[in-house]
Image (cartoon, grey):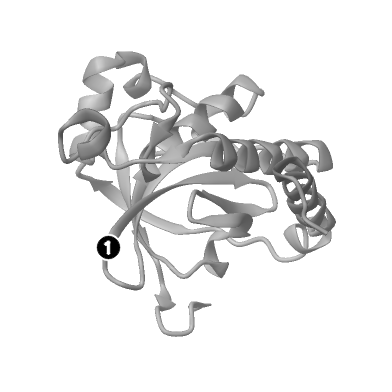
Amino acid sequence: MKMTRGKLLLLAMAMQLSAWGTASAAPAFMHTGGRTTQPVGHYDFCQRIPVECNERTPKGPPVELTRKLWATIINVNNSVNTRIKPRTDLENYGVEEYWNYPDNGYGDCEDYALEKRRELMAAGVPAGNLLMTVVRQPNGDGHAVLTVRTSLGEFILDNLEPKVLAWNETVYTYLKRQSTENSGVWVTINDGRDAAVASVR
């Protein structure tokens, strides 16, 4: 029987919600280092929307990952991945690199991540727990995802992966992300994993 898009989305959400026990079983956090260069696209984005680089989050524990928040994270991830259609910056804006909210219904990796960040902030998650993150794919290409920092570990919202995974369950090498205290500052990530087996050291 052919399933409608809406039914497929509901099935995906149900499967992710059933993974709540897994999400709460083994917290995994990235090891971050010192300040590093801000991606050019994010710098330009902040010049156009200054508030994006002026968000401050007091130092403290990550947001508590409740069953309700887990459902919200899954819903936002699935909704944005389904709603936004992939299109390169060159096709969309006529330039190679242009970070933006995908308000026209199209975007590339960082645009998906920015939209998820915006929607989760609107749902009450502090900016310091929603971190734009730059990674390297197994084929060597650069990619951007959203890291959600929670009391039960850090999870990745990705337009190339329908499931919300713990960061150390993904296939990526992590390079840098936004600071937890200042949205205009980026810090290095000491991945600490063997890329071949993606295991935690």
Give the residue pinned by disc 1: 141
Residue found farthest to the front: 1
Foreground residue among 108 and 33 = 108
Q: How many marks?
A: 1
| Residue 58 in sight from this viewpoint | no
Residue found farthest to the bottom: 196
Judged left or right of residue 33, residue 61 is right
| Residue 72 in sight from this viewpoint | yes
- Residue 43 vertical position relative to residue 149 in the rendered view, above or below: above
- Residue 175 vertical position relative to residue 195 in the rendered view, above or below: above
Residue 201 position, x and y percent, is 49, 78
Determine the residue positioned at 48% across, 77% down.
Answer: 198
Q: Secondary structure at mark 1?
A: loop
Foreground residue among 134 and 115 = 115
Foreground residue among 106 and 177 = 106
Determine the residue positioned at 37% across, 46% down.
Answer: 177
Foreground residue among 117 and 63 = 117
- Residue 65 vertical position relative to residue 29 in the rendered view, above or below: above
- Residue 57 vertical position relative to residue 145 in the rendered view, above or below: above
Badge 1 amino acid: Asp
Judged left or right of residue 194, residue 149 is right
Determine the residue positioned at 33% across, 27% down.
Answer: 100
Judged left or right of residue 110, residue 38 is left
Residue 147 position, x and y percent, is 50, 47
- Circle 1 residues within 10 Å: few <14, some 14–19, many ≥20: few
Residue 67 position, x and y percent, is 82, 43
Determine the residue positioned at 29% across, 50% down.
Answer: 34
Instruction: Give the quarter of the figure containing the N terminus.
Output: bottom right
Quarter of the image where one finds residue 6: top right
Residue 186 position, x and y percent, is 30, 41
